[in-house]
Amino acid sequence: MYIDDTIAALATPLGEGGIGIVRISGPQAVDALEAIFRPKTEKRIRDFESHTLYLGNIISPRDGGVIDEALVAIMYAPRTFTREDVVEINCHGGSMPLRKTLEAVLAQGVRLAQPGEFTKRAFLNGRIDLVQAESILDIIRSRTHEGLRAAVDNLEGSISREIEGIRKQLSNILALVEVNIDFPEEDEEAAMGPGELEDELNKAAHEITRLLEGAGKGKILRDGIKVVIVGKPNVGKSSLLNTLLREKRAIVTDIPGTTRDIIEENLNLAGIPIRIIDTAGIRETGDEVEMIGVERSRKSLKNADLALIIFDITTGIQDEDGMIMDLVGDIPHLKLLNKIDLMDRAEELYDEEFIPISAKTGAGMDLLEKNIGKIIEMDNIIGDQPLINRIRHEQALQRALESIENAKKSSEVGHPLDIIAIDIKEAWSHLGEIVGDTVTEEILDIIFQEFCIGK
Amino acid sequence: MTFSAGKYDVIVIGAGHAGSEAALASSRLGCRTLCLTISMDAIALMPCNPAVGGPGKSHLVREVDALGGEIALNADKTFIQMRMINTGKGPAVRALRCQSDKRLYQYEMSGVLQREKNLHMKQDLVEEIIIKNGQVKGVITLAGAVYWSPTVILAGGTYLRGRIIMGDLNYSSGPAGYFPANKLSDNLRSHGFELVRFNTSTPARIDGDTVDYSSLTEQVGDEEEYYFSYMSHGQKRPRLPCWLTYTNTKTHEIILENLDKSPLARGEYSAKAPRYCPSIEDKVVRFTNKESHQVFLEPEGWDTKEIYVQGMSTSLPLDIQLEMLRSIKGLGKVEIMRPGYAIEYDCIQPKQLELNLGVRGVEGLYSAGQMNGTSGYEEAAAQGILAGINAAMYVKGRAPVTFSRSEAYIGVLVDDLVTKGTEEPYRILTSRAEYRLLLRQDNADLRLTEKGRKIGLVDDQRYEKFIERKNQIEELTEILEDSVINPGDEHGEKLLEELSSSPLKKSMSIGEILKRPELDSSHIERFLPGSEKYPRDVQEQVWIEFKYEGYIKKQIKQVENFKKLENRKIPPGIEFQGIRGMRMEAREKLQESKPMSVGQASRIPGVSPADINMLLIYLEQRRRETGGNEDEGG
Ligand SMILES: Nc1nc2c(ncn2[C@@H]2O[C@H](COP(=O)(O)OP(=O)(O)OP(=O)(O)O)[C@@H](O)[C@H]2O)c(=O)[nH]1
Ligand SMILES: [Mg+2]
């Protein structure tokens, strides 16, 4: 678990336009590549030269469709960063295919890397020295502490609570199975009726499916988290979008009311997929087209995960700004003070409340990215927990579901209890990865509490 | 006054199920062994139920057998009925259980011990272990004899400061009326060991002539001949039936009315009792909605009228015991021959042990059996053979022997004890084994006999028999893989139809065909005429491997992952307290258990995956600081 299972993550810094890298490290890295990559050369993937780029298509394991054209390189151990087999997939179709590629990789039994995990491996495998590693180790240290806190907090969070519920359900099923096995003929009431096991498994599968389908939020890996740029007309919303994307995506003019419809684009921040949305400036207007645009802005705010509210430093805070603040309400948000290039010593304005930026010169973008990252990871922006945990949960749920389906199949073909138990235990431990308990003790506790056994 | 009474290579304290195996193992490995017992009449005593085996337990028995131990052979020589249980629940959990003739069991085992040429049996009570400078030197007995030895195995069972409780009556005693060992506990404490106090109870033995069998359900053993040991095949023994009856609301009323007469129920004793072996008082109090509990009447042997009343363990006073038994169907006129009782005893907190059952910090001292907080004859035997082996290894300057969780139930048992300690008398269960589909009772020999041979406990006769069985398994597997039936094959098609199995669409090996749900090992002979020459157990074994191939592979893969962490060794002498970034609780837990591998550390309750990450980083830092000279395993 902790040493050398295979891990993957996006290795693209925020806003690097179209190109992004999915990095895989571990013994199954090449297997995962084989499952999703169709090279354009005759060469078999196994025969690829190490440290050499090959062109081909990434294929969706779900429907066999082409996700993206990509350049891939296999780097065989030990001449790699982690000293494990490493695969890098360079996608160039933008961040959407990039995420789908990651998703395809994760579907091959690869685990999403934890923060700092590549570096941790590099260190443990003797690739980098202590000084190099020290800073990253600090991150890991702080994360583990935060992780622990988060693990506790998460238990109060709704998804975690539900996962916990399903896990309990599985524990009960397992306890029933195990009491039948380890205490045969002892408690007749514990004996399972026909179809009882199947019913219980169906219930658990149903719960997981429901969770996976999610309460309208959809799959994170597919949709990203939703960041909406709002503000009065002409404050520089479209300019900010362009700057973040590093391309001239939205039309920018000095005419207030330029953007009439919402514009959506994808980008990545430290491996977290983000869907960024530019909106029409919000104001009272008589123009019919603009009115529709304003209406859409309001709407897209409704299901935003994060709002970036832009203020124009040259005009100061106005009535309309207040109205926008009200609209945003308690949606997590950051307040940006734009056009600081027009003011002297404007950077000094930075305080807890406003982040000074210039969409034109790019000043303050680091600070903005840092703050976005912070709010996403620390402040439980989505629902009630950090995004990164949600991706993990999703993966765990997916795997648990597969194991339960296997258990059901085993039971259908008449496999005995001990065989079925293997799949149920596996499902349990996938969910347990989130909470980190050991299955045996918990099952035994239930057995001894619930069943009357013993001589 | 003491006197010097002789020198030995190994001294075993106790001749119960752990002591017997330990003494046999070390003497068979060529060590001059002394086995001291409180009474020569108490050798291999079954003070609780007269039975061997059951889920997990039969696995242990067969493992001990595969290593060259005695419990399986002895059970096979002395059973009064044998049953394969859990037959419908899968190959991993199928388990053999026998009812034993209790006295015959003792008689046979005692004979084996006495005939062993390097083994010296003596009756005496050990009061002191001599330890000097962290090294065992010998023992001092009640009679003043000082026996010298570089190794001592503690296998004192439930004798240490034993106290029997029956209602308000309680007195110092070992089990079944034997002497207790009252001084050894203090001596162990004075050496700095932590002891815990456990409690277990046993039911009354009743007079078989006073039971009305006409109203009870008879339970006979299996017709088919099963044995614990592959060495025992062909032996036949006469059978005796058991009987099934139930408690009723009247019984429960009697118990509830008299609860105040049980000091245990009153909470006056703090010793921990096993949750899986509750007294009848406990069951009635905790499961108020159950109107009756099963009661099995198990004869204690051919030459005794005594019957063990399974399900009725109790520490109530004698008169109440009689009253409650007489309320049960078939027992209306019953007479008690031996009352039930609870017994309290001291044992060693097993966290102080290492995986070879050596006591940490003292060279040459080992501990096994109920002494280590377990319950059950099978658990005791398994630890006994391991301790015996390791004492011998120590004497001979050979490397210690340990078993992994992925290799044997013995490994699961010892790792659980040593890594997690135990809060109650520990019993093995199949659900404790993560890889139980690999650790089946049918393949114990395949897993362990080679290892036993290397250790030196597997004699030629056993080894030849093992090789023969192994070859047969390989041969039959190969034949089943290679024999292909084609669609349209007359014999094949007819057979499939007869067995209501669908016709073949493509050519298939017999092994493949046998995976079908409607087929099992009994069909091998139908498909493959001539395979009758392979014994049933060979056919069964081969079929299991075919049938559950996918799952077996899955578990093998899990084991590979498991081994990665097991192989990350933790060098001895690490100060876990000083690991930066690890939570205090985890540091303390690690410091207490002193795990020898990262895998072992990860199983300690209270140590989280995040802590393990910190440990890994710490170990790597340390390895570099010390110039990478330390054995890191791998
Ligand atoms: N000097 C300076 N000018 C800026 C900055 N950001 C935006 N502008 C200018 O402000 C004007 C409006 O910018 P837009 O990005 O179109 O503003 P908007 O908020 O999208 O406006 P609407 O779409 O009309 O709501 C343009 O002339 C930009 O060049 C900045 O940071 N500094
Ligand atoms: Mg605009």
Image (tube, grey):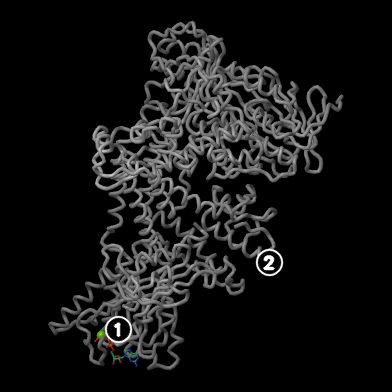
Dot 1 amino acid type: Lys
Between residues B320 and B325, which one lies in front from this camera angle? B325
Determine the image quadrant of residue B108. top right
A326 over B561 or under it: above or below: below
Chain letter of mark 1 equals A
Ligand 1: quadrant of the figure: bottom left
- The residue beneath circle 1 is A237
Determine the image quadrant of residue B199. top right
- x, y percent for residue B185: 71, 31
- The residue beneath circle 2 is B625
Name the residue: 38% across, 15% down: B217
**Helix, strand or loop under label 1:** helix
Mark 1 is surrounded, within 10 Å at the Cα level, by few (under 14), some (14 to 19) or many (20 or more) other residues, namely many
Between residues B499 and A262, which one lies in front from this camera angle? B499
Q: Is mark 1 within 8 Å of ligand 1?
A: yes
B531 over A402 or under it: above or below: above
B83 over A206 or under it: above or below: above
**Helix, strand or loop under label 2:** helix
